[in-house]
Image: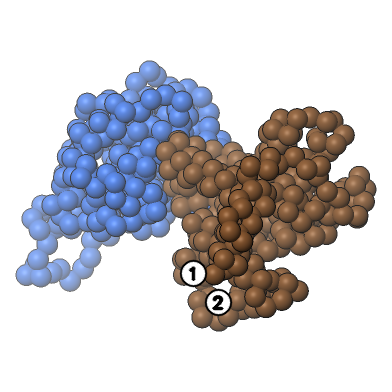
Chain colours: A brown, B blue
């Protein structure tokens, strides 16, 4: 029972991170119908940037964290402005191929600067975040992931529900033509979606980097996990992305704990295939015929 | 162009995808604070004319290839919709096009996109005053509203932008006659109280001409007839082709079916 509880909490914290980065992915898809294949690289970039801020610039942890988030946000804007905007009006497949190209480019840059070895952050999380109770032992980083995950979720929930910009973003996702007719700056909404997606990806990258260590290939592979997550939740549902993330996170940790750690990477994809056979539009997706 | 003119379209041609010519030299003038109707059969180019004004041709790969559209004395043809809406021209699209997954009130808030830094509480009140029927639906998803309510939502959302020129595309589409009457009364009221100039595209020519000051009849991408609305209503051709009455002014009936059809003399 205790083991179960421990796995459960670990799974939930990892799941929140998956869900949040999948949320960024879904946002881009919803507003501009673009599948972002560079999502894993954005995640890794966030992790490495944080590493650079900590070890090279030697900023305090909190400042480094905020600086990383800001840098990721700006990076998202830059990607939209310089790489995607010139392709507006071109067939969607060009844009999607462009994101594949961006992925290779980012990977190359990271390998150039940091190499392919596993790196770790200096230990900075305060010990009081860890929970020890009977045999349950939750490392501080999982608690931190949980707190950050929930915080971001609430923040974005409030942003989308109550702020004007958030409502404009949802209006573009809902009916782009009508949004245009009311003067919503659709390109600005695209840019903002990319910026927020990059920010959230970077944040997840940092936390996953603390858990697993920082390595270009591993982190970008984790980024690929957004695919089972979003397909599970439905490509066009932000809430579905979060729930899909939680499910995949839990499945992974339970498989790792009860069956074998080496299976934990495979199970999400197995579940994905099963879900696609039963519910082709995901658990919360809309049954619309607009797929890539 | 005089001060009393808010919009002047001068001989525009519109081409979609570089090959399909839809408008072939349309000219029209909209007077400030007036209601101007565009009537005509399907495919006459009424909607395209509105889209040429509002800049919404662009996403559909259409372009004004010839002629000018001047609004408040400045040329606006082929400008982006983000620019044109900020000058005060808002189009209400045909077929209503609500944001289905947003609540009614959120739909209205999107209307403030052109001036989103300003407060909008008063404008919400103004819109609910014009459309009391949607007040109790405020917190509901727009996708669940009825056709009449949706029409009120999309018109209300356009009003939130404080338009100087409102382009209404078929507000009566698919609505019950009673609701159509209500909508048209509200259009008239908005025009009178807010001083909004309105261009009204309608199949329901009778209703449209009743509340309009001036009317244009379009056919095959051209304006074929124009005149003060009250004169158009009396015109025998208009009566026959667009108002569904015999030339004498009484409703057509099978009793007096003629062996010949009246010809459209302008074709």
Please report whichever mark, 2 or 1, sits nearer to the chain's N-terminal start. 2
* Above or below for A206 versus A63: below
Q: Which mark is residue B148?
A: none
- Towards the viewer: A265 or B251: A265
Instruction: Indicate the position of residue A280 as horizontal and vertical percent values.
Output: 53, 75
Q: Which residue is mark 2?
A: A275
- Tell me: A264 left or right of B124: right
Which residue is rendered at x = 81% and y = 42% of the image? A122
* Point 15% across, 47% down: residue: B181
Can you give x and y, in whole percent of width and height, for residue B83 in the image?
A: 53, 32
Above or below, comparing residue B170 to residue B125 in the picture: below
Give the class, few, some or many, for how many residues have Cα within 10 Å of label 2's Cα (few <14, many ≥20): some
Instruction: Classify mark 2: helix, strand or loop.
Output: helix
Question: For this rendering, which residue is in front, B156 or A18?
Answer: A18
Query: What residue is disc 1 on?
Result: A283
Helix, strand, or loop for circle 1? Answer: loop
Q: Is residue B200 left or right of residue A62?
A: left
Q: Which corner quadrant holds the C terminus of chain A?
A: bottom right
Left or right relative to B99: residue A231: right
Chain ID at mark 1:
A
Q: Nearer the viewer, residue A55 or A172?
A: A55
Q: Is residue B8 visible?
A: no
Residue A227 is situated, as x and y percent measured from the top left of the image, at 65, 65
Above-or-below relation of B76 to A130:
above
């Amino acid at each position: 029972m205790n083991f179960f509880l421990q796995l459960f909490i670990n799974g939930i914290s990892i799941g929140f991170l998956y869900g949040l980065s999948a949320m960024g992915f879904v946002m881009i898809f919803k507003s501009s119908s673009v599948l972002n294949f560079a999502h894993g690289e954005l995640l890794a970039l966030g992790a490495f940037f944080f590493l650079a801020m900590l070890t090279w610039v030697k900023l305090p942890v909190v400042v480094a964290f905020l600086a990383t988030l800001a840098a990721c946000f700006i990076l998202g804007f830059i990607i939209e402005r310089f790489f995607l905007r010139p392709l507006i009006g071109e067939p969607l497949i060009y844009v999607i191929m462009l994101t594949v190209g961006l992925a290779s480019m980012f990977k190359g840059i990271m390998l150039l600067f940091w190499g392919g070895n596993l790196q770790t952050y200096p230990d900075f999380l305060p010990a009081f975040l860890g929970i020890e109770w009977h045999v349950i032992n939750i490392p501080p980083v999982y608690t931190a992931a949980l707190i950050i995950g929930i915080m971001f979720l609430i923040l974005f929930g409030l942003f989308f529900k109550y702020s004007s910009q958030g409502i404009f973003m949802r209006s573009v996702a809902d009916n782009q033509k009508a949004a245009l007719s009311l003067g919503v700056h659709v390109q600005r909404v695209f840019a903002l979606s990319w910026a927020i997606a990059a920010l959230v990806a970077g944040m997840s990258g940092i936390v996953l980097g603390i858990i697993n260590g920082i390595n270009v290939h591993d982190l970008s592979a984790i980024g690929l996990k957004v695919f089972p997550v979003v397909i599970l939740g439905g490509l066009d549902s932000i809430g579905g992305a979060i729930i899909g993330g939680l499910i995949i996170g839990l499945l992974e940790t339970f498989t790792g704990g009860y069956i074998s750690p080496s299976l934990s990477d495979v199970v999400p994809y197995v579940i994905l295939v099963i879900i696609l056979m039963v519910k082709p539009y995901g658990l919360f997706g809309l049954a619309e015929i607009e797929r890539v | 162009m005089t001060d009393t003119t808010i919009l002047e379209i001068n001989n525009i041609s519109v081409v979609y995808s570089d090959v399909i010519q839809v408008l072939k030299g349309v000219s029209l003038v909209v007077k400030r604070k007036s209601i101007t109707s565009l009537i005509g059969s399907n495919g006459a180019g009424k909607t395209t004319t509105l889209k040429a004004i509002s800049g919404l041709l662009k996403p559909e790969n259409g372009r004004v290839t010839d002629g000018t559209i001047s609004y408040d004395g400045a040329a606006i043809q082929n400008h982006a919709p983000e620019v044109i809406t900020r000058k005060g021209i808002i189009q209400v699209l045909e077929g209503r096009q609500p944001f289905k997954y947003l609540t009614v009130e959120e739909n209205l808030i999107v209307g403030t996109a052109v001036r989103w830094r300003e407060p909008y509480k008063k404008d919400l009140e103004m819109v609910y005053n014009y459309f009391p029927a949607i007040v109790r639906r405020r917190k509901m998803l727009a996708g669940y509203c009825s056709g009449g309510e949706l029409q009120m939502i999309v018109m209300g959302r356009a009003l939130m932008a404080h338009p100087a020129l409102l382009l209404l595309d078929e507000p009566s589409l698919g609505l019950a006659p009673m609701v159509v009457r209500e909508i048209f009364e509200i259009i008239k009221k908005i025009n009178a109280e807010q001083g909004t100039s309105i261009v009204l595209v309608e199949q329901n020519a009778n209703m449209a001409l009743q509340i309009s000051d001036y009317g244009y009849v379009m056919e095959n991408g051209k304006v074929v007839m124009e005149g003060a609305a009250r004169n158009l209503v009396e015109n025998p051709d208009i009566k026959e082709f667009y108002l569904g009455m015999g030339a004498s002014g009484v409703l057509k009936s099978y009793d007096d079916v003629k062996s010949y059809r009246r010809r459209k003399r302008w074709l």
